[in-house]
Image: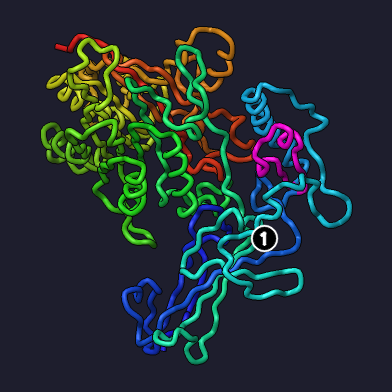
Amino acid sequence: MLTVSRVHLQCDVPVVGCEIVPYVLLQRDDGFFMTDDDYQVAPVDGYCVKYKWHRIQSDKKVAICSVHPTEQATVQCMGCVKAKISIVKSYHCSSKCFFDAWPHHRALHERAASALNEYGIQDEEIFVRANNSGSGRLVAPQSNPNLSNGTKSSNAAAIAQKNGAETWFEVGYAKTYTPSSDDVGHVLKFECVVVDAETNLPAGHAVYNTVLTSRVIPAPSPTPRRLISVSGDEMTGHLNVDGRLSSSGTFTVLSYNILAAEAASTEIYSYCPSWALSWPYRRQNLLKEIVGYRADIVCLQEVQKNHFEEFFAPELDKHGYQALFKSKTVELFNSNGNVIDGCATFFRKDRFSHVKKYEVEFNKAAQSLIDAMIPSAHRKSALNRLLKDNVALIVILEAKFTNQGADNPSKRQLVCVANMHVNIHQDLNDVKIWQVQTLLKGLETIASRADISMLVCGDFNSVPGSAPHALLTSGKVDPLHPELALDPLGILHPANKLSHELPLVSAYSSFARIAVGLGFEQRTMSLDPKTDEPVFTYYTREFIGTSDYIFYSADSLAVESLLELLDEDCLRKDTALPSPEWSSDHIALLAEFRCKPRTRRG
């Protein structure tokens, strides 16, 4: 006989579009425990498990707060209704919620007004309260589909049970279930029971095991980020709505630290709802964001190996990307087994072809350096300092598109894309500088062998003005730079060896070169005027700053446009990153480049 010992959900807040995968633990007569995944090939002792999902549909109509999606809405913004903004964004759980969110919410109105070129919205008409009838229903347009979405479910096969004002609909018969818009505002029930494999009927005195979720919430939708031309012209539309905007002679590059699932804990990010930190939700939200940018080249950091193999590679393949990955070499053990992350690079197969790949393991480079420079008596301590298991992935690509404006259109257009994640420890600046210098020397070697454009992307864990940033952008580091003072292994001196000949420029510094004109201050409000870099690419309660960059070789590439930066008005004032809208503690950077004529470096 087989019995169900335990059933639970990793997260009881279901989100539209995010698959729910229950955990089911079984027990055999001999006391052996097993998960239900173990018997998928064949029944166990003639028994298997039968699943069913129900949706509890109440006669009471419910709307969900757009800011706090686990709360029922009591206020609706009528400005959104007039401006024809998505109705789900108009709801708030209280007037305080509405006013707190107003700086961000007002931007929705301004964008809608700008797009439609119609009218402004009067503040006194902004919201309405729930009526005073005691029903708790919102004063809302009769045509609002979100208040009646459960009554027309295409998934509902039959009414399972009616109890007073509640009706139970059967909506699924597999172990997993992905909520749809029809489920918003309703509770789901998961049910499983051991059945006879031949009759498909409950076995003996088998008990139906059930789990209830909270109300299904809509997938949060962040404000779209626009592509801004460095000439000062705003590109038409939004990247994640209107598709890839690059022309045939340009290409786009995305760099994004997606925050490894192993690091996304409620202890570290206590301000983020637990359901928004769960990997089933985050992976779908990250995928939607990444695919929405439609970049030609995508560089991701903190990608767990199992997530690359089981999710990102196959999912992005559906969108025309080829995938390459370089993992770290040391696995970390946790309750879910061994976990290891690394750097993943994807490129559109219709835009580029793969020429070559180089994998950089800084542990190997450190071992060689220590063997050559450090006396035997000090090698152990030197290894402890330098071996941090960071990696980089270098990919050589050949463009398939027309190289407009080049001096020789028939010539091969090669692009070298380096994807790097630098050591994070703030007390190991010498290690950061050494890792960056090691990568740059390798790229110099590649550049000396071919006429090739360079792109260096990643999370460098180094703020603007730091020694690694200076090395990348200036080709050298001032010998008096304070970060060179701590060099216990003697690997940074003499300082003049910290140099390279690659003409690298930070893509986002191009914003500073936009001619002063209409909207200039708005477009540069998230740039630090002292460094011309973003004010932040990493935003948590503990740290706000810039550590992510896209560097390019200025002698062969020119920036055409950049993805606008997030500013603090785009984030709720009571939280930080990650959030329900943005599933990483970093923000994505994207730049559009055009190849330009140049003289080959000698």
When the figure is inspected, residue 426 is found, relative to residue 523, above or below; the finding is below
- At a point 21% along the width and 30% down the height, the residue shown is 396
Q: Quadrant of residue 362?
A: top left
Q: Is residue 236 visible?
A: yes
Image coordinates of residue 451 in percent, x first then y, are 17, 18
Q: Is residue 79 magenta?
A: yes
Residue 208 lies left or right of residue 349; in this view the side is right
State the residue position of label 1: 151
Task: Please identify the quadrant where the C terminus is shown.
Answer: top left
Q: Is residue 274 magenta?
A: no
When the figure is inspected, residue 251 is found, relative to residue 571, above or below; the finding is above
When the figure is inspected, residue 281 is found, relative to residue 563, above or below; the finding is below
Q: Closer to the camera, 358 or 323?
A: 323
Q: Quadrant of residue 487?
A: top left
When the figure is inspected, residue 11 is found, relative to residue 368, above or below; the finding is below
Image coordinates of residue 524 in percent, x first then y, are 53, 17
- Mark 1 packing: few (<14 Cα in 10 Å), some, or many (20+)? some
- At a point 57% along the width and 74% down the height, the residue shown is 210
Q: Determine whether the residue tagged by mark 1 lies in a helix, strand or loop.
A: helix
Q: Amino acid at mark 1?
A: Thr
